[in-house]
Image (cartoon, rainbow, N blue to C red):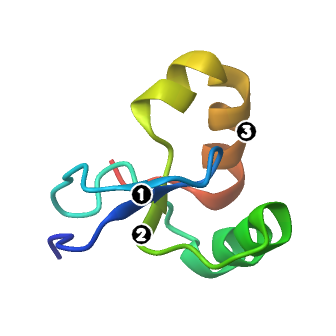
Amino acid sequence: MTVDTPLTCYICGETSDRATVDLIGCFKDMQDAKERFIEKHGHENEGYLDICPDCQKKNPNHAENAYQKYGKYE
């Protein structure tokens, strides 16, 4: 499956047109991640949830914890 919708960062909540192929980098457990995203940010995500490169650099521990909790397509 190739992603042709925007990607929304789980950490900062911003949506961009960063591209991915075959969901690489996106969360596997999208439903649980989506529920927590809404709790954190107060709105639904606009695209598939992942973690943007900026947030991975700024918050590597948070990113790793999120990927451990929700899984990650690699």
Q: Give coordinates of residue 41: x percent, y percent.
A: 76, 63
Disc 3 element: helix
Q: Which residue is the extreme one toward the top?
A: 57
Circles 3 and 2, Cβ within 8 Å, touching? The answer is no
Q: Quadrant of the N terminus?
A: bottom left
- Left or right: where 37 falls relative to 28: right
Vertical side of 15 occupied by 39: above or below: below
Apparent side of residue 16 relative to residue 39 in the rendered image (left or right): left
Q: Which residue is mark 3?
A: 65
Query: Considering depth in this image, is 59 or 15 the residue closer to the camera?
Result: 15
Crowd class of label 1 (few under 14; some 14 to 19; many from 20; radius 10 Å):
many
Question: Closer to the observer: label 3 or label 2?
Answer: 2
**Tag 1: residue type?**
Cys
Is label 1 in a helix, a strand or a loop? loop
Query: Residue 38 occupies which quadrant of the picture?
Result: bottom right
Identity, as a three-letter code, of the amino acid under mark 2: Tyr
List x then y, in percent, for residue 49: 49, 63
The Cα atoms of the two marked residues, 3 and 2, are separated by 18 Å
Residue depicted at 71% across the width and 66% down the height: 37
- Mark nearest the camera among 1 and 2 is 2
Residue located at (70% from left, 76% from top) = 43
| Mark 3 neighbour density, 10 Å: few (under 14) some (14–19) many (20 or more) | few
List the residue tagged with mark 1: 26
Of the image marks 3 and 2, the number of the one nearer the N terminus: 2
Q: Which residue is mark 2?
A: 48
- Label 1 with label 2: CB-CB less than 8 Å: yes
Indicate which disc, 1 or 3, sits on the residue closer to the N terminus: 1
Considering every residue shown, the one lying at the far right of the view is 39
The spot of residue 44 in percent (x, y) is 63, 79
> Residue at 79% across / 72% down in the picture?
42
Where's residue 48, x and y in %? 42, 69
Amino acid found under the numbered disc labelled 3:
Asn
